[in-house]
Amino acid sequence: MSIAVIIVAAGRGTRAGGDVPKQWQTLAGQPVLAHTLAAFAGMDVVLAIHPEDRARAEALGTGARLVEGGPTRDASVRAALEALAGSAVTQVLIHDGARPLPSPALIGRLVAALDDHPGAAPALAVTDALWRGEAGLVAGTQDRSGLYRAQTPQAFRFEAILAAHRAHPGGAADDVEVARAAGLDVAIVEGDEQNLKLTFPGDFARGEAILKGRMMDVRLGNGYDVHAFCDGDHVWLCGVKVTHSKGLLGHSDADVGMHALTDAIYGALAEGDIGRHFPPSDPQWKGAASHIFLAHAVHLMTKRGYRLANCDVTLVCERPKIGPHAIAMQGELARIMGVDVGLVSVKATTSERLGFTGREEGIAAIATAALVRA
């Protein structure tokens, strides 16, 4: 699976006021687009821009691939899709440049939905009463049942949305409209009230408040775990099965790295440790896969309104050698947590033949997790 991100930023919108298009105006000390691009850090990004904005885009220094957009939104998306055609990309997220606050949790929900659907898009159910108006007066009401406020990014299987855009006559409001015209089912996933689209001057003040809140509410947690070696022919480390001359002894699958990371997240939330939530005295957790514990910690994190800023896991052992497996471990932890792989670090060290790890009696793991308000 290879995911690319298309950010559409070729518009000349004027409703936000100012001397430059809204995506180039300043938000919390940086151009709006700088925040939008930061939300997809570490991912393959194609930025569709107006030809007049190339110098501004290059000055951002993000490494995003630049393509010139068209006169309409769907034309810009089509240009970016064509730039990706023939590559190894299998999934694509299409996002408005003037939405600078998508969360990792939202992105994770969209990518997960593509396992079962050719398209997925975030939306918020309409909760306010709806009126019809004429000449400034209320002329009637509209049933709000089944109505949603659409957001981006909108996610698709790449070849399907490319074919849909190639077949569409143009003029679509968004990519969901293009997809549905081609007969593609698009799943609705839970949107995010903070995933604000900057349209009017007042939206910038709200965006700044959200960013300020995210920057102020940071939580750190650490985790430490140890498991002794026992008879066996493999060990589980950070979700990856590694062939070894011994196994690891534990009530569950003894994944020492994942246990330490899980405890780091619980610690950041002041939620104790794995033992509090999954008591070893409970036989149902005998031999349990450790991804159950990590997924539970991530669920608590999301429920409490936080997202993972980054995490770092260090495995301490003489053997097995971790280096050949570190990238796979990084990817598996990111998959379980529904975050970008760039937010996850896995590395290893030895204890210079000192202590129980030096005597190859077991493996230790240390983990740190940073959470921020989503």
Image (spheres, rainbow, N blue to C red):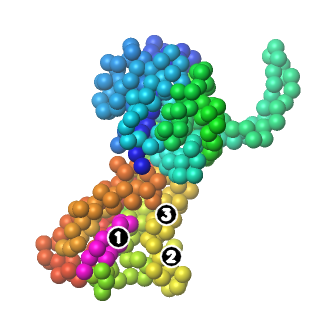
Residue farthest along the left direction in this orientation = 352
Q: Position of residue 55 (x, y in %)?
A: 32, 18
Is 18 magenta? The answer is: no
* Up/down of 87 relative to 71, above or below: below
Residue 79 visible in the current orientation:
yes
**Hey, what amino acid is under mark 2?**
Phe
* Up/down of 345 relative to 106, above or below: below
| Circle nearer the N terminus (1, 3) | 1
Q: Is residue 130 left or right of residue 156?
A: right
Q: Position of residue 229 (x, y in %)?
A: 28, 83
Residue at screen point 31% across, 83% down:
232
Label 2 crowd bin: few (<14), some (14–19), many (20+), radius 10 Å: some
Q: Is residue 193 left or right of residue 239?
A: right
**Hey, what amino acid is under mark 1?**
Lys
Residue 220 visible in the current orientation:
no
Residue designated by label 1: 241
Residue at screen point 47% across, 54% down:
338
Label 3 crowd bin: few (<14), some (14–19), many (20+), radius 10 Å: some
Numbered circle sitting on residue 295: 3
Is 243 magenta? The answer is: yes
- Image quadrant assignment for residue 87: top left
| Circle nearer the N terminus (2, 3) | 2
Dot 2: element: loop
Numbered circle sitting on residue 278: 2
* Up/down of 69 relative to 337, above or below: above
Dot 3: element: helix
* Up/down of 188 relative to 237, above or below: above
Q: Position of residue 321 (x, y in %)?
A: 21, 68
Q: Nearer the viewer, residue 161 or 302?
A: 161
Q: Which residues are magenta?
A: 234-245
